[in-house]
């Protein structure tokens, strides 16, 4: 060590510099690579690090020099390594990963062994502990435009692996965007923002990653019908009021949404001298007679749908045993799938007892505007010990819960509340969502199935596939250029699933698809050729080139797992 702090130092730098040099660590003595060994499969990555030792035996110090060394792989055909120590498995075999640098007394180096298997289960260096969706956010200008998302998993050892083809992809709103269940390719449908979720499941655990997909152009959700509840109310001319609720039917999913207070709704009374109605659907009796209350909804594309109800107003105030109805609490939020929330319906009466609990009364009907995801119990049969007003979460999102109470005089009072099971996004620091959040698929299967239709053939001019909703609404699916309106080349719709309380088996409705136009060449394997009523065909011909042709979709479980995401291909040549 004399060469560091002896005569050579004095001659080169002077006495002061030499003494300072002897008091501080300087010069790289050695380098160590960690981990010393690693095993990957082709396509996986692993991070190596380099630690340098400086100074002499009396004043040694270490520091991370991963970015300051030269990395190399002895066999690049097995694995390559970048300037930051990130190794990527290329082909089966074994290679030596080396970190080298210029030391005080000459070059220093350290090595590790990396083994690569051609295929293999599991992830490099341990289990998947987190999942990132890349890009974290993406915006497109208009419907039909696409964006590719990928899912990158991180293992317990810090290695990363591309899991894009091993995760289950889903979109929080099929009205805004759809995403390939196994591909991660998102397609814009309508204006708005949707959460793209990737779920990775292995060894009984689930890891989730999320991204945001925004469609800045196009139209928002379109409604095809408006229903007013109740359909009839009786009021007095003394200023008695009655609340109406408007439910809009989605043209995409066939589900109903409470649009009573929507800016798209306009309320009106055909004879205001009989009864008036406010912007929130609250009607007030004015004079004797009958009038129609109408809710008119204008879609963003300018189309209009409407619904009506009737009010009968009497000259003298009728008996009013039931004056009003209230739901308590006004909102319930739960944190896990299959969690429940209990609402109570409280009625106010004109005679004693003035306040009564009507929750389980057979005169009260409970309604959920998203019954396939957030069903609510009711007690129409008047059963003792019933669980009316109890809502169960089978998916993430929210629902409007409505109670309708019919008084002894035939008048109807309504009240509403909200039930929420919010979809929790990852924490800002990149950690997975905290336990107890409403992540789809982590605790239960949502009672909602998605059906996707597309054309596998070459025809782009006149083909069309249609299907009704589970409740019989015609042409909820209207896919293809042959549709009289606007039919996309890939179409989706949702259908409710039901779970047997005893066997826990989940089943869904039989959905019949009808194909017309072009030179038809058949259905994909997962749609059974059938008659127009859904009866499977047992002998050829199973379809004709001229059509129309039919097939029936089954949501029956596969190996005990609900078949809740089905994609059907129709061949039009």
Image: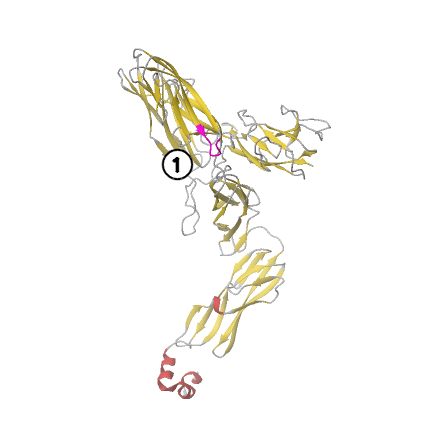
> Does residue 567 lie above or below 86 as drawn?
above
Helix, strand or loop: magenta stretch: loop
In-front residue for pair 307/340:
307
Q: Position of residue 92 (x, y in %)?
A: 63, 58
Q: Quadrant of the C terminus?
A: top right
For disc 1, the neighbor class at 10 Å (few under 14, some 14 to 19, many from 20) is some
Q: Quadrant of the N terminus?
A: bottom left
Could you tell me which residue is drawn at 36 percent across and 79 percent down?
Answer: 23
Q: Position of residue 307 (x, y in %)?
A: 45, 23
Q: Position of residue 368 (x, y in %)?
A: 43, 27
Q: How is the image coloured?
A: secondary structure
In-front residue for pair 408/459:
459
Mark 1, residue position: 334
Could you tell me which residue is drawn at 43 percent across and 87 percent down?
Answer: 8
> Does residue 17 lie above or below 197 as drawn?
below
Per the image, is 300 magenta? yes
Per the image, is 318 magenta? no
Q: Specify the segment rendered in magenta.
A: 297-302
Left or right: residue 403 compared with residue 373 = left
Q: Quadrant of residue 572?
A: top right
The answer to whether any part of residue 246 appears in the image is yes
The answer to whether any part of residue 389 appears in the image is no
> Does residue 255 lie above or below 335 as drawn?
above
> Does residue 321 lie above or below 334 as drawn?
above
In-front residue for pair 228/567:
228
Q: Position of residue 485 (x, y in %)?
A: 57, 31
């Amino acid at each position: 060590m004399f060469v560091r702090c002896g005569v050579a130092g004095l001659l080169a730098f002077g006495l002061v510099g030499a003494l300072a040099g002897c008091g501080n660590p300087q010069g790289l003595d050695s380098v160590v690579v960690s981990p010393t060994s690693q095993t990957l499969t082709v396509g996986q990555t692993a991070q190596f690090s380099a630690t340098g030792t400086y100074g002499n035996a009396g004043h040694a110090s270490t520091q991370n020099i991963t970015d300051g060394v030269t990395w190399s792989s002895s066999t690049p055909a097995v694995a390559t390594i970048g300037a930051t120590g990130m190794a990527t498995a290329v082909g089966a075999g074994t290679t030596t990963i080396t970190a080298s640098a210029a030391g005080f007394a000459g070059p220093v180096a350290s090595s590790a062994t990396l083994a690569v298997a051609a295929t293999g289960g599991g992830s490099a260096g341990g289990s998947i502990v987190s999942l990132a969706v890349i890009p974290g956010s993406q915006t497109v200008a208009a419907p039909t435009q696409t964006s590719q998302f990928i899912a990158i998993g991180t293992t317990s050892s810090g290695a990363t692996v591309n899991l894009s083809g091993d995760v289950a992809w889903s979109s929080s709103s099929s009205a805004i965007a759809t995403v390939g269940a196994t591909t991660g390719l998102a397609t814009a449908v309508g204006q708005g923002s949707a959460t793209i979720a990737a779920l990775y499941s292995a060894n009984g655990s689930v890891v989730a990653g999320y991204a945001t997909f925004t469609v800045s152009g196009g139209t928002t959700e379109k409604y095809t019908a408006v229903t007013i509840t109740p359909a009839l109310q009786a009021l007095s001319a003394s200023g008695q009021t009655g609340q109406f609720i408007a439910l809009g039917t989605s043209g995409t999913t066939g589900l109903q949404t409470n649009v009573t207070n929507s800016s798209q709704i306009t309320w009106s009374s055909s004879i205001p001298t009989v009864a008036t109605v406010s912007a929130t659907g609250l009607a007030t009796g004015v004079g004797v007679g009958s009038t129609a209350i109408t809710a008119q909804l204008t879609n963003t594309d300018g189309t209009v749908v409407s619904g009506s109800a009737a009010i009968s107003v009497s000259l003298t105030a009728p008996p009013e045993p039931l004056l009003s109805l209230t739901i308590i609490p006004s909102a319930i939020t739960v944190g896990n799938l299959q969690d429940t929330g209990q609402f109570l319906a409280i009625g106010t009466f004109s005679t004693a007892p003035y306040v009564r609990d009507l929750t389980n009364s057979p005169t009260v009907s409970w309604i959920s505007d998203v019954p396939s995801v957030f069903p609510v119990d009711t007690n129409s049969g008047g059963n003792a010990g019933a669980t009316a007003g109890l809502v169960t979460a089978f998916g993430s999102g929210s629902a409007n819960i409505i109670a309708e109470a019919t008084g002894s005089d035939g008048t109807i009072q309504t009240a509403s509340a909200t039930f929420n099971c919010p979809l929790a996004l990852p924490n800002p620091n990149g950690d997975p969502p905290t336990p107890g959040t409403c992540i789809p698929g982590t605790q239960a299967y949502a009672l909602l199935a998605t059906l996707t239709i597309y054309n596998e053939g070459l025809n782009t001019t006149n083909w069309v596939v249609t299907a009704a909703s589970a409740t019989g609404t015609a042409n909820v699916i209207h896919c293809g250029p042959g549709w009289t309106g606007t039919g996309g080349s890939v179409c989706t719709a949702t259908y409710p699933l039901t779970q047997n309380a005893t066997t826990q088996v989940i089943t869904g409705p039989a959905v019949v698809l009808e194909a017309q136009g072009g030179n038809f060449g058949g259905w994909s394997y997962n749609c059974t050729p059938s008659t127009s009523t859904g009866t499977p065909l047992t002998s050829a011909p199973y379809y004709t080139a001229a059509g129309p042709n039919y097939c029936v979709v089954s949501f029956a479980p596969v190996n005990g797992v609900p078949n809740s995401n089905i994609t059907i291909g129709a061949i039009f040549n």
